[in-house]
Amino acid sequence: MSKSTIRPISKQRTTQPHKPKPLTRRGLTARAAAMLTVSIFALSACSTASGTSTVAGPTPSSATSFDPATVKADGTLAAEVPATIKSRGTLIIGSDTTYAPAEFLGGADNRTPMGYGIDLAKAIGATLDLKVDVQTAEFTGILPALGPKYDLGISSFSITNERLKAVNFVSYLSAGTAWAVRKGNPKNFSPDDVCGKSVGVQTGTTQEDPDLKNRNEECLKAGKAPIDIVTLKNQTDVTTRLVNGSIDAMIAESTLIGYAVQQTNGAVEKIGGIYNTASVGIAVPKNDPAFAELIRKTVAKLIADGTYKKILDAWNNSDGAITTPEVNPTVKS
């Protein structure tokens, strides 16, 4: 839900680079992002226009096996916690919990913060010998409230130069654009040859525009058949179309593709690499660089001891793993 800018797109490219237009966090419109958590639950029993039902895999409430109680406190790192936080004994985190599988509300009551971002927050708290209080917040209100209200912001923030002017960031993930097809790729789809193919995409994402829009223009300029672009409001509806074979492939942000594979019990699979990647970070108050460095060291410890990998594996997003967290990493132009 970044109003100003969103992650650029590309590492493993199949076409010429496309610059994304300003949208929201990770390429979703605010409306689409808000609907994502609700729609993801529907995937376990959704139907197509023809009435055919598709039964998916685990619901978000059972998708993760991470237990923060398995993380031991690190006395050396805990000693560096700012006095105000240490005396409180609780790390307060602002998060817009509408973005599965990173941060969303699930569980039996659909009110429990969940996702790999939430699990990472809990692991950070456990390492620093602190309780963790994840508070649901409007995405645009998190960064301005760092310090007075929240100790950290963990809400799938793409690290941008504009945001770096206001806060410090500790990188913890890399995400971009990815493709998926039905298991076994029965239609022999290739991201390198999309002309004349039917491709599903969520409305309002950078995958719809500029990615598919520009690819389609290239098809037409080359005298080839246009792409049959099927745009739907909810990512789960796109996934259902793919599972039922009414589209050849789908394109989405890499974290959503990984989650779709998990939610459908492998009925869909990734194809090709992730491209147009950018760093995702934990937001820390700008006036506290020492605290940002402490969070960096804590994330580095979680990477080193395997906790970080366990968290991402649980949500089928290990493709986005990084090896070295950084404070205020250089943003790709």
Image (cartoon, rainbow, N blue to C red):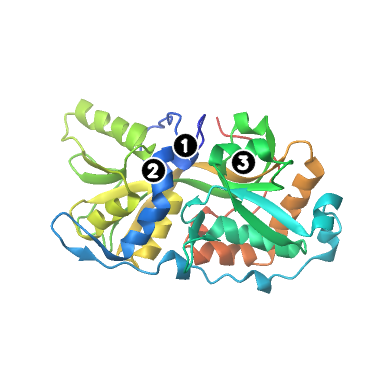
Q: Quadrant of the C terminus?
A: top right
Q: Which residue is found at the position 43% from the left and 39% from the top?
A: 30
Q: Decide if residue 121 is on the left or right side of residue 8.
A: right
Q: Are marks 3 and 1 in contact (CB under 8 Å)?
A: no
**Could you classify mark 2 by the number of other residues whose Cα lies within 10 Å: few (under 14), some (14-19), or many (20 or more)?**
many
Q: Position of residue 238 (x, y in %)?
A: 28, 51
Q: CA distance from mark 2 to mark 1?
A: 9 Å
* Quadrant in the picture for residue 87: bottom right
* Three-letter code, disc 2: Ala
Of all residues, the one furthest to the top in this rendering is 221
Residue at label 2? 32
Marks 2 and 1: which is nearer the front?
A: 2
Tell me if residue 163 comes above or below residue 290 in the rendering. above
Q: Are marks 2 and 1 in contact (CB under 8 Å)?
A: yes
* Three-letter code, disc 1: Thr
Q: Which residue is found at the position 68% from the left and 47% from the top?
A: 152
Marks 3 and 1: which is nearer the front?
A: 3
Q: CA distance from mark 3 to mark 1?
A: 14 Å
Q: CA distance from mark 3 to mark 2?
A: 19 Å
> Circle 1 sits in a helix, a strand or a loop, which is it?
loop
Q: Which residue is found at the position 20% from the left and 45% from the top?
A: 198
Q: Position of residue 246 (x, y in %)?
A: 18, 53
How many numbered markers are drawn?
3
**What label sits on residue 142 in the rendered view?**
3
Residue at label 1? 24
Tell me if residue 163 comes above or below residue 75 in the rendering. above
